[in-house]
Amino acid sequence: MTGVNQSATGSDAETAPGLLPAAPPRGRSLWRDAGRRLWSNHAAVIAGFLLLIIVLAVIAAPWFAPHDYLTPDWERAASGPGTAAGHWFGTDAIGRDLFARTMIGGRISLAVGLLATLVSLLIGVVYGAIAGYFGGRIDDVMMRLVDVLYALPFMFFVILLMVVFQRHIVLVFVAIGAVNWLDMARIVRGQTLALRNRPFVEAARAIGVRPAAIIRRHIVPNLLGVVIVYATLTMPQVILVESFLSFLGLGVQEPMTSWGLLVNEGAQELEVAPWTLIFPALFLVATLFCLNFLGDGLRDALDPKDYF
Amino acid sequence: MPLLEVRDLEISFATPEGTVHAVNSVDFDVEAGEFMAIVGESGSGKSQTALAIAGLIAANGRLSGSIRFAGVELIGLPERDYRRWRGGGIGLIFQDAVTALNPYRTIGSQLREALVTHFPCSRREAERRAIAMLEQVRLADPERRLRQYPHELSGGMQQRVMIALALLPRPRLLIADEPTSVLDVTVQADIGALLRTYQQRHDTAVMLITHDLGFVAGLAERVLVMYAGQVMEYAAIDALFHHSEHPYTRGLLRSIPRLDAPADDALHGIPGNPPNPLARPAGCPFRERCPYAFDTCLTMPPLVRAAHGGLKRCHLEALGP
């Protein structure tokens, strides 16, 4: 259709000259289209690459870092960054290599962020979409359960978990995910309530499509935008909650560390050894920035109507 | 036995302002394979009647009476059983295809879903049949359409997709709820012809719902005229157009603009407004706008056999030429 081509090229040309497709794109699915649109969003692409570098560095660092993360270098305790002794980011108060610690802490922080967010995403979307779509009594019962869980104090819940299952890093994921899905469920339910009265849902019902298929194929794709933005907001929050738990001694334990913990320790030594704050904070902030840009780009890319 | 029997259908909605009586005691039949039309102005209850047949009345709606489809009572049927009648039994074309198509999915995936829900088959087979159906609704370049999103098509093309969507499960009764009211007149005629051709070729009953008597002419075999939730007149199309027995239908017919009228002829309308559905006055609902109204009209006229062979709801014996 010529009209479509024109509108597509028109908006492409405004924002990204040189990227406009010559012919209407072929072989389409929501994800493939989204990929193409994401690729032409410079901020998101750069953020994605930076994030990839951070992730790779965090995974590979212990193999190329000159020092490990737990052996104190007594002669160079609290020394500043430099290349001479191989302590690129300097050392902490008891002489452990900050570069190695930042990398190892990144593993924990990213893993917690990713897993807890995925868990809350999965449970929250399924739960919220079901409650919102069926409505009525099912909705009432399901959402009251959410309210009850909300009322449960988070710390109490975590301590309970620790007592029952012993302290274990996986429990941190579970605890955070188990609390965060409540927000997600509420948001998704609200969106679903609005979506289920949209004519295309009614049209699907009129064709005789089963409720499970309507939720999967009609409701959930329309939720993606909101869900992704919320997920990118959840991830930083989760990383910070982890550091809080660790600070209280409920999360990761010394000598293991995480970005949240490193920032916490660094903040206390800010005046004498500012690098102990700056480097972990730099990584944390860069990661959160990248996530936000990427999430923003994904939201735009996942809207088929949005050529930019 | 008629394909669809509607008896004493009443639809009301509980709202904060009170109970809205959208449809009051509606009776009619639809024969298998016939093309019938329901005509009425907005608020006459025609769309709610259609939704009631498809079992898609809003949650605050209340139904009473009887809707029998192929001999099966639909009112009170649990959702799970109702689903079996939707699509394959009763197909529904919505007024606004722009909102009735999922913006996040390609035309192809939506058509495949409509088909596979009723006739499980391979992806390739589904695609082949979707293309054949798009050709049947005369949408140009069907292979490419399958890969496009709804917003990439024009309103008329989207409505054709919507029709294809409703036809793929091969319904025995196709309800078209104002399928053309958002489209321009030339497309409107095309869509009408399309429905007519399909009905004749596949022996599918069509129930066309519209506010435009002019659109119905040349398409429908029988026309049901609704006003304020009541059946006013139900007759064969020629009888209705040439020998209407009801002042309301006469008013509607006169309000169709004519090309052969003198240029200085004013447009005709029916003075006044339909009664408030929250508080309908007693008696004939058209009484206050009817030029023939007399004392007896303060009581509700029964639906009786009229001289043209159809049904009418009017106290007048005859209406003259």
Image (spheres, coloured by chain):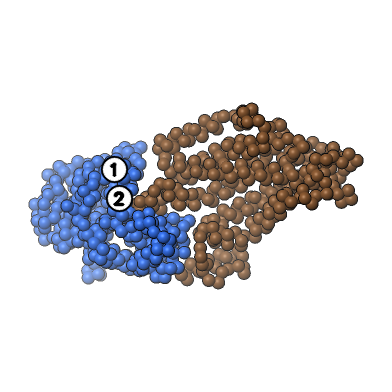
In the rendered image of the structure, the colour used to display chain B is blue
Q: Chain of mark 2?
A: B
Return the residue at label 1: B77
Q: Is residue A301 left or right of residue B133?
A: right
Q: Categorize mark 2 by other alpha carbons within 10 Å: few (<14), some (14-19), many (20+).
A: many
Return the residue at label 2: B85
Badge 1 or badge 2: first in the primary sequence: 1
> Please, what is the three-letter code of the amino acid marked with disc 1?
Leu
Q: Residue at x 29, y 53 (%)?
A: B90
Check the picture and name the quadrant holding the C terminus of chain B.
Answer: bottom left
Q: Are marks 1 and 2 in contact (CB under 8 Å)?
A: yes
Q: Is residue A254 left or right of residue A126?
A: right
Q: Categorize mark 1 by other alpha carbons within 10 Å: few (<14), some (14-19), many (20+).
A: few
User: B36 or A253: which is nearer to us?
Assistant: A253
Q: Is residue B84 left or right of residue B73?
A: right
Q: Residue at x 48, y 56 (%)?
A: B104
In the rendered image of the structure, the colour used to display chain A is brown
Q: Is residue B227 visible?
A: no
Q: Position of residue B10 (x, y in %)?
A: 24, 43
Q: Position of residue A128 (x, y in %)?
A: 49, 41
Q: Say which element carries label 1.
A: loop
> Please, what is the three-letter code of the amino acid marked with disc 2?
Trp
Q: Position of residue A280 (x, y in %)?
A: 76, 44
